[in-house]
Image (cartoon, grey):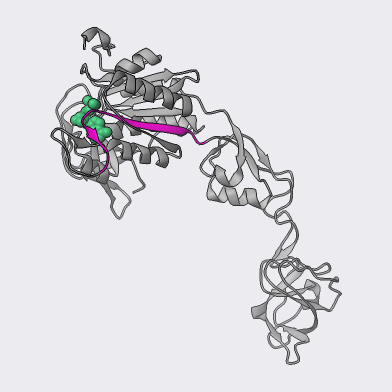
């Protein structure tokens, strides 16, 4: 292929922050849509929710016991209990048929509506049912309101409950179900297509022909997409062929909210993803001042200006590139404002040796907290961009600024990939 077909990335290595800004400036939250509440877990709310009703909707008992008027229990003790007739039983879902009159008690079970006329509940442990079962001995006085959950105690009708920008969690679903909200306006879960490129790649098991390797990036990237809260769509394994790559990217751009490719964005003439993206979209091909994951291409393709992120093919590079560039972009599409992995301080449990090359290195590390909660990190294994096993074991990426590395015992910043 003629050199002129290759778009130029420029000689300059660009800082990671510039590459991230370039992407994030071109990605906007997906237009909000109304969805079934249960399907919205993990999505970002795009409206304010106010409670249409009181929660709880009626006064009810927090304890198993006896509904009484507090005034009737004054002076009660184990030695001198107050004896009251038990006039009814009130269970959850079965309100009392009549009001409680002065001098009466009703047996009541947790969650049951407090009968009219009652103002407190004596817990069953402070009572004794008298032999014939028609009376109860109250062995302790209770104050008005004791063990009563009043209507609106959690939420009052008209209260603001949740607001735009909040991520819907399991707890949010419970609250929304509890106030009868069946649909919510959210930024939809982004649909993200993933494809691999490379003539050397094969899918699945079976014997390998000379020069072949198995496609590992697609499995990894599909899972990373799903773990980022998106819907992952497999766009397949594509040959190093201009038409095949064009068709796959065009189809992905038409059916997905974002497309992630791996391979074909390096310097070589056979790195066709950058060539195709340059033709299809408003593409920028970058050499980022990081290691691994230096080459990266980003374009907006098709009528909907679908973002296409061209990640490098080396398996570790594609994962690191996903973490640094794709994941923040997908989170922005999903309407999130917290885009980046947390960067936390840690202590280097061993020296991290490197030499100056104008790049920030991201070392794959295991992390452990000591008794005082301080994080200590050490290498997760081989640090080559093909050492996928170490990346698989890594809990974080230690940030090694350009220079000679970080000595043992010194502070190092770590992008945590999981909670440690
Ligand atoms: P590329 O970015 O296409 O030049 O690929 C760089 C290196 O990553 C080469 O050694 C490829 O064989 C390898 N590679 C590319 N894509 C994949 C993939 N999907 N799975 C595993 N290795 C890959
Ligand atoms: Mg390739």
Horizontal side of residue 249 vs 184, given as left or right:
left
Residue 339: tell me if it is visible: no
Horizontal side of residue 291 vs 277, given as left or right:
left
Q: Quadrant of ligand 1?
A: top left
The vertical placement of 10 against 347, above or below, is above
Count of numbered circles on the image: 0
Which residue is pictured at 33% across the width and 24% down the height? 310
Looking at the picture, tell me which residue is in the foreground, 5 or 165: 5
Is 194 magenta? The answer is: yes
Q: Position of residue 210 (x, y in %)?
A: 13, 34
The vertical placement of 110 against 306, above or below, is below
Q: Quadrant of residue 417?
A: top left
Q: Quadrant of residue 326?
A: top left
Is 170 magenta? The answer is: no
Looking at the picture, tell me which residue is in the foreground, 79 or 2: 2
Which residue is pictured at 30% across the width and 35% down the height? 319
Question: Can you say which quadrant of the picture contains the N terminus?
Answer: top left
Looking at the picture, tell me which residue is in the foreground, 363 or 206: 206
For this orientation, the residue located farthest to the top is: 4
Q: Quadrant of residue 196?
A: top left
The vertical placement of 285 against 256, above or below, is above
Q: Position of residue 328 (x, y in %)?
A: 41, 31
Residue 115: tell me if it is visible: yes
Highlighted range, magenta: 189-204
Looking at the picture, tell me which residue is in the foreground, 134 or 391: 391
Q: Position of residue 15 (x, y in %)?
A: 30, 21
Which residue is pictured at 24% across the width and 42% down the height? 365
Q: Position of residue 146 (x, y in %)?
A: 70, 67
């Amino acid at each position: 292929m003629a050199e002129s077909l290759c778009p130029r990335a420029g000689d300059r290595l660009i800082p990671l922050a510039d590459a991230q800004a370039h992407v994030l400036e071109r990605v906007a939250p997906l237009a909000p849509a109304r969805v079934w509440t249960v399907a919205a877990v993990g999505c970002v709310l795009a409206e304010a929710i106010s409670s249409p009703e009181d929660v709880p909707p009626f006064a009810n008992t927090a304890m198993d016991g006896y509904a009484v008027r507090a005034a009737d229990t004054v002076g009660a003790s184990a030695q001198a209990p107050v004896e009251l007739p038990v006039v009814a039983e009130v269970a959850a879902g079965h309100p009392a048929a009549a009001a409680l009159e002065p001098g009466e008690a009703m047996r009541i079970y947790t969650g049951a509506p407090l009968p009219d006329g009652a103002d407190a509940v004596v817990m069953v442990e402070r009572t004794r049912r008298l032999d014939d079962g028609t009376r109860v001995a109250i062995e302790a006085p209770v104050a008005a309101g004791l063990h009563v959950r009043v209507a609106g105690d959690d939420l009052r009708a008209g209260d603001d409950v949740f607001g735009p920008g909040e991520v819907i969690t399991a707890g949010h679903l419970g609250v929304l179900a509890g106030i009868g909200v069946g649909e919510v306006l959210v930024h939809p879960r982004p649909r993200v297509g993933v494809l691999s490129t490379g003539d050397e790649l094969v899918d699945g098991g079976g014997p390998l022909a000379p020069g072949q390797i198995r496609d590992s990036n697609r499995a990894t990237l599909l899972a990373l997409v799903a773990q980022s809260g998106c819907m992952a769509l497999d766009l397949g394994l594509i040959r190093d062929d201009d038409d095949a790559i064009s068709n796959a990217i065009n189809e992905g751009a038409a059916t997905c909210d974002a497309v992630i490719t791996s391979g074909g964005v390096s310097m070589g003439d056979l790195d066709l993803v950058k060539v195709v993206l340059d033709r299809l979209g408003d593409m920028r091909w970058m050499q980022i001042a990081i290691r691994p994951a230096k080459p990266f291409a980003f374009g907006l393709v098709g009528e909907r200006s679908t973002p296409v992120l061209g990640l490098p093919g080396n398996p570790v590079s594609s994962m690191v590139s996903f973490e640094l560039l794709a994941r923040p972009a997908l989170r922005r599409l999903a309407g999130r404002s917290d885009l980046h992995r947390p960067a936390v301080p840690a202590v280097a449990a061993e020296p991290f040796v490197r030499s100056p090359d104008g790049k920030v290195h991201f070392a794959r590390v295991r992390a452990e907290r000591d008794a005082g909660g301080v994080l200590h990190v050490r290498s997760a294994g081989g640090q080559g961009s093909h050492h996928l096993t170490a990346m698989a074991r890594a809990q974080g990426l230690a940030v090694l600024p350009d220079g000679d590395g970080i000595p043992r015992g010194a502070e190092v910043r770590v992008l945590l990939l999981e909670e440690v």
